[in-house]
């Protein structure tokens, strides 16, 4: 293996990649713009839907009015700009819906909710006279109907709170006496810790996905694509050994995987503050999106290890395809299998330990998440990198064994990697 030859071939592969539109889009442009644009679209959509929901007027029918002591509640409800009583007591409609059509109108969307104020009877009524219940019939499958229920509950809740306060005051109970027990909460996390939690859940997940996506197209193009373009045989005639050729291709695929992952992390960190922070403006705590300086080399090491593993695994499978389309079909299962351990690594109640450090892909996700949170478990970080690099090394050894067979290099073998392994490697 000649490193001078590897360097020449490596630069040649990079130059070819920059001229390939598919690779540039998937390996460079997509990581930069995909998630910032996706987050912006999601934020804009949520804002639009929220504005639409707040803009429409809820159409309700009152089946049974409130007790006489709470007659002002119906006036308060009718005075709401976002609520219109279209039938029953308090209706302001010139053409109210007949009662027999309420259920049909509710199912058809002409009516959003049917409200009944039911006076409490029995011992509960004796303990607190004029107490009442509210029954709301609504269509849970319709957003307008759910919004109408929320608006009615809000008005009733405010009225009930005022009335309970008046009743308690009439019985000589102050605010402290009315509170039989109270539950209070105190948030001990800082704005930096909350931001690190959000970044840890997103960056680790997106980094793994984008590294895999960055290796996907180049691994197929540099193997099955070469065979489809009939340039593989020509490449084998150069003075470099076949091992040097494959090593240069392998490093090229891994490089694009690393670049895709890191570009995506940078783009996500730049955009997440501008997109996510407005969503949290109504919360009681600000969010500071910053990560420890030491987390950067840990993320880089994880990206490099993952890229080396994905590049080797995908190239082995894609090399047995005769066309670019066949190569995509062979490599796609590997790409989708990434999600299985990745979901384990995205669980907030799972920590990096000796057991999880032995689980491929999930271990890197947990390592990155902990590093962003300022937790550096160096022994398990070492195990994580060793496991990932060990898998990459195993794939490289398999590739070296495959290169010994001329029928593979010349494209004479017609079959998948699993058939080749059964008939050749383990024969």
Image (cartoon, grey):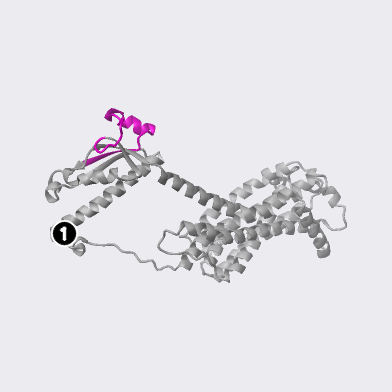
| Residue 109, placed above or below residue 188 | above
Q: Residue 286: which quarter of the image?
A: bottom left
Foreground residue among 92 and 371: 92
Question: Does residue 277 show up magenta in the picture?
Answer: no
| Residue 115, placed above or below residue 9 | above
Residue that label 1 marks: 169
Q: Could you tell whether 113 is left or right of 367 in the image?
A: left
Can residue 130 be seen here?
yes
Q: Residue 324: which quarter of the image?
A: top right
Q: Could you tell whether 284 is left or right of 180 in the image?
A: right
Question: Does residue 116 show up magenta in the picture?
Answer: yes
Q: Tell me the magenta residue range.
A: 88-117
Q: Residues within 10 Å of mark 1 (few under 14, many from 20)?
A: some
Can residue 362 be seen here?
no
Q: Could you tell whether 271 is left or right of 86 in the image?
A: right
- Tell me the residue at 82%/46% (across/down): 410
Q: Residue at the front extreme?
A: 94
Assign a secondary structure to mark 1.
helix
- Tell me the residue at 36%/41% (across/down): 58
- Measuring from the top left, give residue 117's x and y in whole percent: 23, 41
- Measuring from the top left, give residue 310's x and y in whole percent: 66, 55
| Residue 207, placed above or below residue 44 | below
- Measuring from the top left, give residue 78's x and y in whole percent: 29, 43
- Tell me the residue at 65%/52% (across/down): 30
Q: Could you tell whether 35 is left or right of 420 in the image?
A: left
Foreground residue among 328 and 393: 328
């Amino acid at each position: 293996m000649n490193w001078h030859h590897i360097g020449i071939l490596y630069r040649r592969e990079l130059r070819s990649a920059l001229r390939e539109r598919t690779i540039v889009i998937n390996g460079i442009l997509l990581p930069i713009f995909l998630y910032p644009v996706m987050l912006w679209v999601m934020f804009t959509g949520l804002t639009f839907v929220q504005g639409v929901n707040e803009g429409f007027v809820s159409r309700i029918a009152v089946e049974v009015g409130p007790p006489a002591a709470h007659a002002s509640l119906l006036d308060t409800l009718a005075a709401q700009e976002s609520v219109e009583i279209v039938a029953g007591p308090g209706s302001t409609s010139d053409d109210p819906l007949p009662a027999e059509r309420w259920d049909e109108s509710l199912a058809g969307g002409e009516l959003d909710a049917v409200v009944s104020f039911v006076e409490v009877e029995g011992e509960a009524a004796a303990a607190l006279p004029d107490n009442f219940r509210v029954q709301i019939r609504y269509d849970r499958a319709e957003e307008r109907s759910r919004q109408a229920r929320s608006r009615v509950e809000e008005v009733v809740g405010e009225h009930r709170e005022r009335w309970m306060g008046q009743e308690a005051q009439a019985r000589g109970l102050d605010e402290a006496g009315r509170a039989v027990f109270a539950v209070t909460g105190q948030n001990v996390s800082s704005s930096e810790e909350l931001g690190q939690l959000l970044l840890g859940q997103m960056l680790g997940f997106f980094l793994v996905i984008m590294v895999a996506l960055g290796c996907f197209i180049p691994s197929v193009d540099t193997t099955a694509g070469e065979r489809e373009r009939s340039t593989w045989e020509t490449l084998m005639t150069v003075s470099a050994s076949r091992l040097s050729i494959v090593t240069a291709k392998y490093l090229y695929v891994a490089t694009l995987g690393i670049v895709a992952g890191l570009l995506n992390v940078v783009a996500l960190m730049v955009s997440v503050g501008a997109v996510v922070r407005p969503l949290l403006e109504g919360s009681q705590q600000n969010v500071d999106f910053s990560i420890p300086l030491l987390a950067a080399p840990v993320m880089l090491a994880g990206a490099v290890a993952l890229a080396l593993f994905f590049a080797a695994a995908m190239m082995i499978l894609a090399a047995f395809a005769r066309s670019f389309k066949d190569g995509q079909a062979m490599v796609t299962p590997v790409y989708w299998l990434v999600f299985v351990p990745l979901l384990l690594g995205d669980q907030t109640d799972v920590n990096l330990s000796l057991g999880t450090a032995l689980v491929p892909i999930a271990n890197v996700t947990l390592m990155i998440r902990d590093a962003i949170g300022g937790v550096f478990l160096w022994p398990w970080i070492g195990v994580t990198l060793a496991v990932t690099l060990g898998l990459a090394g195993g794939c490289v050894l398999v590739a070296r064994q495959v290169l010994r067979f001329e029928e593979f290099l010349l494209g004479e073998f017609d079959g998948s990697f699993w058939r080749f392994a059964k008939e050749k490697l383990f024969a």
